[in-house]
Image (cartoon, grey):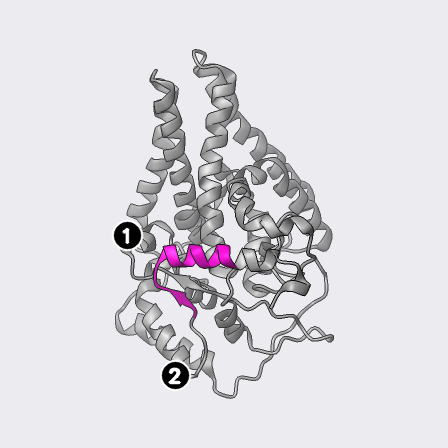
Amino acid sequence: MTNKTLSFSRTDSANFFRTLNKRVNTYFKENDIKRTGNWKLWVKTIVMFSLFLAPYFILLTLDMPGWAQLLLTIVMGIGMAGVGMNVMHDGNHGSYSKKEWVNRLMGSSIYILAGNVYNWKVQHNVLHHTYTNIHGHDEDLEAGRILRFSKHAEWRWYHRFQHFYSILLYGLLTINWAITTDWQQMKRYMKRKLSYGKFPNPVWNWSKLVISKLIYVSVWIVLPLIIMDHVTWWKILLGFFLMHYTAGLILSVIFQLAHVMEEAEMPLPEKDGTMKNTWAIHQLNTTVNFSTKNRIVNWFTGGLNHQVEHHIFPNISHVHYSKISKIVRETAKEFNLPYNEYKTTRKAVIAHFRYLREMGMKPALQA
């Protein structure tokens, strides 16, 4: 990652964002709707936490066959992904509620997902939402050396197989938070003095990380080992891994369908650090929607299938994206700007792995 500061063009002769923002504001005003979450989000929060935590307490209190225990850990993984996409995500964007303490509470749910609020806000709110799909600035494009998401990244011989093995790695997302990623990110972000809002006290920030990790391990591994003494230790660790793998696989695939696609541009800045487009137009060029007419996908993904709307209006709760998407789509078309979208999840998934295959080809062989 580079520390060089980038700047977006301020010239939008057609006034796209000004027009779009005015229309979206008018929608909320005329319908007397708050831009934050509503009762539907609270109901969804209860459902997602129930999917995540109810199986955990069932496992701690009831004796059941091994296959049933593993099935419950998969349900926990689905709930874990659901909490992350629907509750934590809106909370840490400040869009869950008009009350800041509610946003902090819901955003803090990341701690039981094995993550860290400070790290997530810097990586997601600052680096990803500001520098979307810009190589060397958006860490969501970074996958070490094992995956190549951009033509600007270094090619290695094994990348030619990445469209096969990538799916195996995607499931490791959240367990990497728990084990390595948070420590590495905090060291890197604190050194660069990055923050979303006021820069935190280093001692307190590191202390929260250590304490939260100790509590996390105690809740998810130590406590089950003590209470479930009739279950061998390796089965508990297997269940823990399976929960994380399920959540990581869901989250990774949904994230990748939004940005690691052929339609999503990955522009580089000029030598002086300037970008060609304004920030709003940049978001249109670098994001992709999928399956926006599917009610189940809309409900479960927390609006992450509405990436165009989310990236232009990150402070609006996802429960409103289906409504404002028509405004965004029509305004983009009016200004002759792209509105990238796949009609179904299946088509988006196929396109993603086709793109991985293209990025895995040796550069000299690419068309």
Hey, which residue is sitting farthest top in the picture?
230
Residue 46 in percent (x, y) is at: 32, 41
Query: How busy is the neighbourhood of tag 1: few (under 14 within 10 Å), some, or many (20 plus)?
Result: few
Tell me if residue 109 is in the magenta stretch: no
Image vertical order of residue 244 relative to residue 260, above or below: above
Task: Read off the residue under disc 2.
Answer: 334
Under circle 1, the secondary element is helix
State the predominant SS element of the stretch in magenta.
Answer: helix
Query: Residue 131's spot in the image, x, y percent?
Result: 59, 65
Tell which residue pokes out farthest to the front in this image. Answer: 365
Q: Alpha-carbon neighbours of circle 2 within 10 Å: few (<14), some, or many (≥20)?
A: few
Mark earlier in primary sequence (2, 1) = 1
The numbered mark at residue 11 is none
Would residue 349 be counted in the magenta stretch? yes
264 lies above or below 209: below
Q: Secondary structure at mark 2?
A: helix
**The quarter of the displayed image where residue 358 is located:** bottom right
Instruction: Answer left or right for 139 relative to 61.
Output: right
On the image, numbered disc 1 is attached to which residue? 40
The residue that appears at 54% across and 43% down in the rendered structure is 173
Closer to viewer: mark 2 or mark 1: 2
Residue 99 in view: yes
Q: Quadrant of the C terminus?
A: bottom right
Are discs 2 and 1 less than 8 Å apart at CB? no
Q: Is residue 160 left or right of residue 108?
A: right
**x, y percentage for residue 7?**
64, 73
Quadrant in which the N terminus appears? bottom right
Q: How many marks?
A: 2
In the rendered structure, which segment of residues is drawn in magenta?
A: 340-354
The reply to whether residue 204 is visible in this rendering is no
Q: Residue at x 54, y 28 (%)?
A: 217
